[in-house]
Image (cartoon, rainbow, N blue to C red):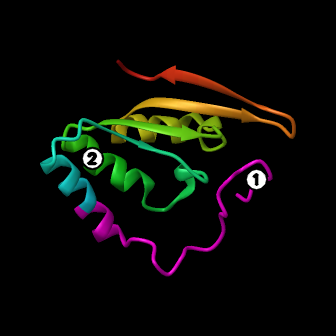
Amino acid sequence: MKCKHCYQRAGCPLPSELTLEEKLKVVEELDKAGIASLAFSGGEPTIHPDYLTVVKAAAKRGFYMAVATNGWKYADIEELKKAVEAGLRYIEVSVDSANHALKLSKVVFS
């Protein structure tokens, strides 16, 4: 999204970006290591094409799934429902401006 306040250099995927298969392998390895929760952050993770696939795969393994987002995607309630159905349990929304940022958190399901 290339937000001015963001510390990430978002844009085109990097040549070194993991494939979906590699991402799912990382989820498997984290599960084997006994990790209890995963949190995605950005750039803006909710717009990545693999986002819900990875959330669902991790949630099926028992991970407590969280995301830090600007909330843009979830302004559409149907998109939010899809994420919750995939296994998302916690959402942190960052409200940013040119001068400061405010973090708002909402537990979807406890």
Q: Residue under label 1, please give it.
A: 3
Q: Is residue 11 above or below residue 35?
A: below
Which comes sooner in the sequence, label 2 or label 1?
Answer: 1
Quadrant housing residue 69: top right
Camera-near label (2 vs 1) is 1
* Residue occupying the far bottom of the picture: 15
From this view, report whether residue 103 is shown above or below residue 14. Answer: above
At which x and y percent is residue 58? Answer: 27, 47
Q: Is residue 24 magenta?
A: yes
Q: Is residue 52 above or below residue 80?
A: below
Within-10-Å neighbours for mark 2: few <14, some 14–19, many 20+:
many
Q: Residue at x 19, y 55 (%)?
A: 28
Q: Residues in magenta?
A: 1-25
The residue that label 2 is drawn on is 58
Q: Residue furthest top?
A: 110
Q: Position of residue 4 (x, y in %)?
A: 80, 53
Residue 99, position as x, y percentages in the image: 86, 35
